[in-house]
Image: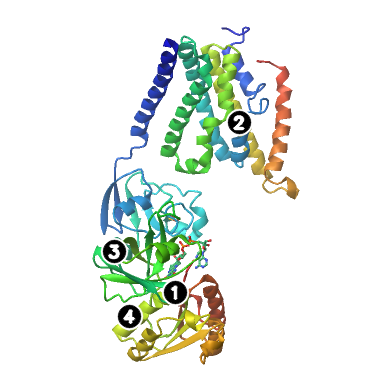
Amino acid sequence: MNLLVLSIAALSGLGALLAFLLEVADSYLGFYGECHIDINEGERELVVHGGESLLSTLMEQGIFIPSACGGRGSCGYCRVKVHEGGGPLLPTETPWLEPEEVKDNVRISCQIKVRGNMYIEIPPELFLIKEFRSRVEALYDLTDQIKELRLRLIEPDTITFKPGQYIQFQVPEYKECPESVYRAYSIASTANEPDGITLMVTKVPGGLATTYIHEVLKEGDEVAFNGPYGDFYLRDSDREIMLVATGSGLAPIMSILHQMAEEGISRKTTLIFGARQKKNLFYLEEIEAFKKRIPGLEVILALSSPEEEDRWQGERGRVTDVLEKIVKNGANKEAYLCGNPAMVEATVELLTKKGIPEELIFYDKFT
Amino acid sequence: MEQLGLSAPVIFFAAIFTNNILLTNFLGMCSFLAISREVRSSLGLGFAVIFVMTCTSGLNYLVYYYLLVPFGMEHFRFIAFIIVIAAFVQLVEMVIERSSPVLYVILGIFLPLITVNCAILGVALFMIIRKYTFLQSVAYGAGGGIGWTLAIVAMGGIREKLRGAKIPKPLEGPGIALIIAGLMALAFVAFSGMIQIQ
Ligand SMILES: Cc1cc2nc3c(=O)[nH]c(=O)nc-3n(C[C@H](O)[C@H](O)[C@H](O)COP(=O)(O)OP(=O)(O)OC[C@H]3O[C@@H](n4cnc5c(N)ncnc54)[C@H](O)[C@@H]3O)c2cc1C
Ligand code: FES
């Protein structure tokens, strides 16, 4: 009996001693103290505790850097220019960076730690990115696959975004989803009613976010998101505009159409909206209404495999077939594409062949 | 406790050359094969192993003879040794993370895995079996660590040289690494006639 107690005590003592030593070591080695982060030459000055990744440190301070993988180093989105205090380039960053970017001090912010004072540079529009709480105001079917989700903001109560940008929707833990994840959804509503946003969500079988939105979420629920992100927005020029959307890819295009109507942009514009069958089209009345408000707008609806009862009179084929027909040459045109990756890739290929330079083709792939 | 008049320096050199823990006992193979692609990271991991082996052999000696033996708890030696080793590796990880982020990323998961590097537990167990004194134990630990580092750095050098070489497809990567390890082991066996410590 004595021996038992004694040996347990001895072993526990050993463990406790080592734990104590490690704790002491950690308070020296793991402690970086107060660090100053200067952003854009004094535009913001943060005082933070070092030791965390730059990405999460900035997040804690309310500066949201785009990140699709949540800091695992597998998306390469979280680029930030670090001019001082970034330490040596890490092997986990190099796969994401071009040689010119390395020369420009671009770093993958989820991989580097704040270890001292830093001087960094980020695009000023990232300051607009915030974490929002909101309430589900409406949630209903647009088609049998796509739901419209309208969110009213609670805190902060307004959002500033460029039409065409997207937000990262937070999917909370639920039965199918053991830990919270973020997914990107484009804003479909006008930027002029900043107290809410509208999303269009296509169901993906077995998808974590889409199953949540289609099957779990109810009107009145509270949801969180952050944003806005992305460089899919209308460029200021006098070129002709080609808007190409399939499925819920219509979302950011709708927001851009709102902008064109509200700002009186009358550039020659062609909207090509593609679907499989008539039942997969939606928002037709809204699009019709835009035709009256936007003088230069022409709309082409295309069905790739219409059914007998659709009695379809409009264009047949994929959006690429339509573009093949109507785009004679790419001079003085710019294109905005949104929808599934296969459509986007095929369309980019076609349009570059037609002579639209790649830097004038803007797109969001819904991956 | 003195073992047949082998002095600490002799044990130290023997552990490096004639009884290289990696190439004659084949302990600590997994990180040897995984991290030996280049000299720089081999050296980094090597230094970490030297440090951990030297310190833990001394500490484990003290724990064994001043804690376990007096209480008649020798049968706890595995768990006690492992706790000491784990704590030390944790410490080394903190030091490396602080001082060299690049090395920290290169070593990745193999740094914490030093905890279960069998060469390190091997050193602790051999020193008990062979009834070394404190000095002999530390010499054996340091020698063992240096020997392990020598082997992995040599391997790193060879693999760097091999990078441009034409290797038959089926032997690329681990295949050729195992063959090289075998040849290196043969070379080290040639030393073993000089002194024997087991
Ligand atoms: C910039 C951007 C904007 C986006 N905007 C929208 C939008 O406005 N509306 C919208 O509905 N979606 C949009 N998406 C896509 C969205 O972010 C999700 O990827 C999609 O909803 C699937 O999420 P999930 O969690 O349900 O599926 P996951 O759990 O991520 O995926 C489940 C499985 O389905 C596969 N999968 C993922 N996406 C698809 C797909 N589209 N089709 C077929 N299989 C798929 C995955 O490979 C996986 O095997 C956008 C994506 C990006 C990058
Ligand atoms: S957040 Fe995805 S790579 Fe950094």
In the image, ligand 2 is in what quadrant?
Answer: bottom left
Q: Position of residue A173 (x, y in %)?
A: 39, 54
Side of B161 where B74 appears, left or right: left
Side of A111 where A313 appears, left or right: right
Q: State the residue position of label 1.
A: A248
* Distance in Å between CA atoms under marks 2 and 1: 55 Å
Q: State the residue position of label 4.
A: A259
Q: Position of residue A202 (x, y in %)?
A: 45, 70
Residue labelled 1 has its Cβ within 8 Å of some atom of ligand 1: yes
Of circles 4 and 1, the one toward us is: 1
Marks 4 and 1, the one that precedes in the sequence: 1
Location of the C terminus of chain B by quadrant is top right
Report the amino acid beneath label 2: Gly
Q: State the residue position of label 2.
A: B28
Q: Which subunit holds the residue at mark 4?
A: A
Q: Name the residue furthest front.
A: A309
Q: Secondary structure at mark 3?
A: strand
Q: Secondary structure at mark 4?
A: helix
Q: Are marks 4 and 3 on the same chain?
A: yes
Report the amino acid beneath label 4: Gln
Marks 3 and 1, the one that precedes in the sequence: 3
Q: Which mark is residue B127?
A: none
Residue sitting at x 66%, y 21%: B19
Q: State the residue position of label 3.
A: A134
Residue sitting at x 26%, y 53%: A45
Hey, which quadrant is residue B67 in on the image?
top left
Marks 4 and 3, the one that precedes in the sequence: 3
Q: Position of residue A219 (x, y in %)?
A: 32, 67
Of circles 3 and 2, the one toward us is: 3
